[in-house]
């Protein structure tokens, strides 16, 4: 039970954003209560022993870190670190009937040689260098704004100070820029994948949802690098929970919130253990759940579009492309069936209601960069983890599946692994470890599984379509308020949105939690 009947702030949801907000507010001397439906904190950023009798703590849902500002780690004194990957990506291919591929990493000279061997010239490598040089400059300008009050569109454009890039990324479909910059189909596909993570769209989607997804995938940390969390994703949320508790916040798990009521000055939060009062309520849940708690009309349905697979292997599989060491190929992002045309074909097939014939996906091996997630015996025996993230798997394809039986998910998993096997010199199944009950160490989650388990609407990992990181009229439901300036306002002045569905949300960032806490603290200063 909560220790008090009223708090300065009640936070609904103990995922990483809620914990960030709790830690900031508690450190500022506010009384804080976090209520979490599950029996543990962390939300989608958790580490789990997924396979019975195996000493492997896998990042079950979210798995890489890019958008978490070092500022948050430093402000909260977190004992948490990330590690760089020496290889960015490897994409296998077949050219002229022989297995080959593109390895990006290991220094410019090696990457240049890999581009030249695949494409026959230096053109694509030069274009690649120029393209990502421009996105890095964009990242340096945009990333710092994410923990500042929400800028206007014009202010962000002026800060970027590159009208051509602004037009290409913020006003026109990303496919136009990709096609005018690169000529090789495989290179184009590798670039496009950052626009399709959990996002069901084509390169030329007029909604620009692919552009928004791409933007968040290239601005992280001011560099666009995607890093490995040491100790797994749970190491971050464990550190955040410790920081919040250490500052005086209360965290109550196994406690589902069922409603929020407010008179415009204070609020009451009803949960299955009673009702508590709050000066401010911070909701670390999807806009769909916020509407339900307030008794409002829900927003338009959201839809996720990914297959998430976790595996434990006794060894890494050998590759058909014998020039590449599997330890390098799998340490970065291993792209499967993600050529430009393949991605478009997969989208069109899924949009028509069919599973993609060649499901696109990407894999990486956490344990190559950070073996600490494995027990010492597994490390000595050469065990490794694999994380697979499948694209163009929209929730609409899985409506016949249930929690008990998921034939569609199982068919997609089989097809995805078969596509991977076309690039391996041995079947992946031969490398899978087995758990204490003799079952292969592999688990898969569809978008609807994520909805059931985590409350992600339609399995959307961003809670809704991502938004550009500037103020839109729809972002200001409360008028000219402190919460609106920080991009965390809702229709009720005492209720703030601190989850991934806030503008500048999505990914493991803590940014909405930080911004909601800053809004509460600024309101408090203004009141005094």
Image (cartoon, rainbow, N blue to C red):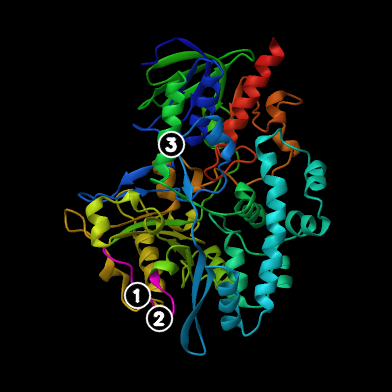
Instruction: Assign the N terminus to one quadrant of the image.
Output: top left
Question: Looking at the picture, how far across and down is residue 190, in whole percent?
Answer: 57, 68
Report how far apart the C-alphas of labels 2 and 1 lie in the structure. Answer: 8 Å
Residue at x 70% of width, y 71% of height: 127
Q: Within the magenta stretch, is there residue 323?
A: yes
Asked if residue 468 can be seen in this view, the reply is no
Q: Which quadrant holds residue 126? A: bottom right
Marks 1/3: CA–CA distance? 35 Å
- Residue 478 in view, yes or no: yes
**Vertical relation: 305 (above or below) 102:** above
Q: Are marks 2 and 1 in contact (CB under 8 Å)?
A: yes
Residue 168 painted magenta:
no
Q: Which mark is nearer the camera, 2 or 3?
A: 2
Residue 502 shown left or right of residue 329 in the figure: right
Q: What type of secondary structure mainly makes up the magenta span? A: loop
User: Where is 499 relative to 333, above or below?
Assistant: above
**Among the two numbered marks 2 and 3 on one chain, the one whose residue lies closer to the N terminus:** 3
Identified at 82% across, 46% down, the residue is 158
Percent x, y for residue 63? 45, 50
The residues colored magenta run 314-326
Q: Quadrant of residue 490?
A: top right
Q: Secondary structure at mark 1?
A: loop
Q: Which mark is residue 237?
A: 3
Q: Nearer the viewer, residue 365 or 265?
A: 365
Percent coordinates x, y for residue 217 in the rendering:
60, 53
Which residue, given by chain and number where applicable, does mark 1 sit on? 318
Secondary structure at badge 3 equals helix
Gap in angstroms between the C-alphas marked 2 and 3: 39 Å
Q: Which residue is mark 2?
A: 322
Residue 118 x/y as whole percent: 57, 81
Q: Please rate how many residues cluster around mark 2, counting C-alpha atoms within 10 Å: few if below 14, some from 14 to 19, many from 20.
A: few
């Amino acid at each position: 039970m909560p220790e008090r009947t009223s708090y300065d702030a009640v936070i609904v949801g103990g995922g990483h954003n809620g914990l960030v907000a709790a830690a900031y507010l508690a450190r500022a001397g506010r009384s804080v209560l976090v209520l979490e439906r599950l029996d543990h904190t962390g939300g989608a950023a958790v580490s789990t022993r997924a396979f019975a009798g195996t000493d492997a703590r896998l990042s079950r849902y979210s798995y890489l870190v890019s958008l978490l500002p070092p500022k948050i780690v430093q402000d909260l004194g977190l004992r948490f670190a990330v590690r760089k990957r020496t290889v960015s990506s490897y994409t296998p291919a077949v050219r002229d009937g022989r297995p080959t591929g593109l390895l990006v990493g290991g220094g410019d000279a090696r990457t240049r040689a890999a581009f030249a061997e695949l494409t026959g010239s230096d053109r694509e490598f030069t274009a690649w260098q120029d393209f990502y040089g421009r996105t890095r400059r964009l990242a340096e300008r945009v990333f710092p704004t994410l923990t500042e009050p929400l800028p206007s569109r014009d202010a962000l454009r002026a800060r970027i100070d590159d009208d051509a890039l602004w037009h290409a990324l913020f006003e026109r479909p990303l496919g136009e820029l990709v096609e005018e910059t690169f000529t090789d189909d495989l290179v184009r596909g590798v670039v496009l994948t950052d626009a399709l993570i959990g996002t069901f769209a084509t390169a030329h989607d007029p909604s620009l949802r692919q552009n928004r997804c791409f933007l968040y995938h290239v601005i992280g940390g001011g560099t666009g690098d995607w890093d490995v969390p040491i100790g797994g994703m749970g190491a971050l949320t464990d550190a955040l929970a410790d920081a919040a508790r250490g500052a005086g916040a209360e965290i109550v798990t196994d406690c589902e919130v069922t409603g929020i009521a407010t008179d415009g000055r204070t609020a009451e939060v009803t949960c299955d253990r009673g009702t508590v009062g709050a000066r401010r309520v911070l909701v670390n849940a999807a806009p769909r759940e916020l509407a339900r708690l307030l008794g409002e009309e829900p927003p338009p349905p959201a839809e996720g579009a990914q297959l998430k697979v976790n595996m434990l292997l006794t060894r890494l599989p050998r590759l058909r492309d014998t020039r590449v060491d599997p330890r390098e190929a799998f340490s970065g992002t291993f792209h499967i069936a993600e050529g430009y045309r393949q991605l478009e074909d997969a989208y069109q097939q899924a949009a028509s209601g069919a599973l993609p014939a060649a499901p696109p996906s990407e894999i990486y091996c956490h344990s190559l960069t950070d073996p600490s997630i494995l027990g010492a015996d597994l490390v000595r025996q050469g065990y490794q983890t694999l994380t697979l993230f499948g694209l163009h798997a929209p929730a609409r394809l899985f409506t016949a599946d249930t929690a008990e039986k998921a034939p569609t998910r199982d068919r997609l998993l089989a097809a995805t692994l078969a596509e991977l096997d076309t690039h391996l010199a041995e079947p992946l199944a031969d490398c899978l470890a087995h758990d204490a009950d003799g079952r292969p160490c592999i688990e898969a989650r569809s978008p609807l599984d994520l909805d059931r388990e985590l409350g992600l609407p339609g399995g959307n990992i961003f809670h809704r379509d991502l938004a550009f990181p500037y103020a839109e009229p729809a972002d200001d439901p409360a008028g000219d308020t402190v919460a609106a300036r920080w991009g965390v306002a809702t229709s009720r002045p005492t209720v703030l949105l601190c989850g991934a569905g806030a503008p500048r949300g999505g990914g493991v960032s803590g940014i909405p939690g930080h911004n909601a806490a800053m809004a509460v603290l600024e309101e408090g200063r203004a009141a005094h």
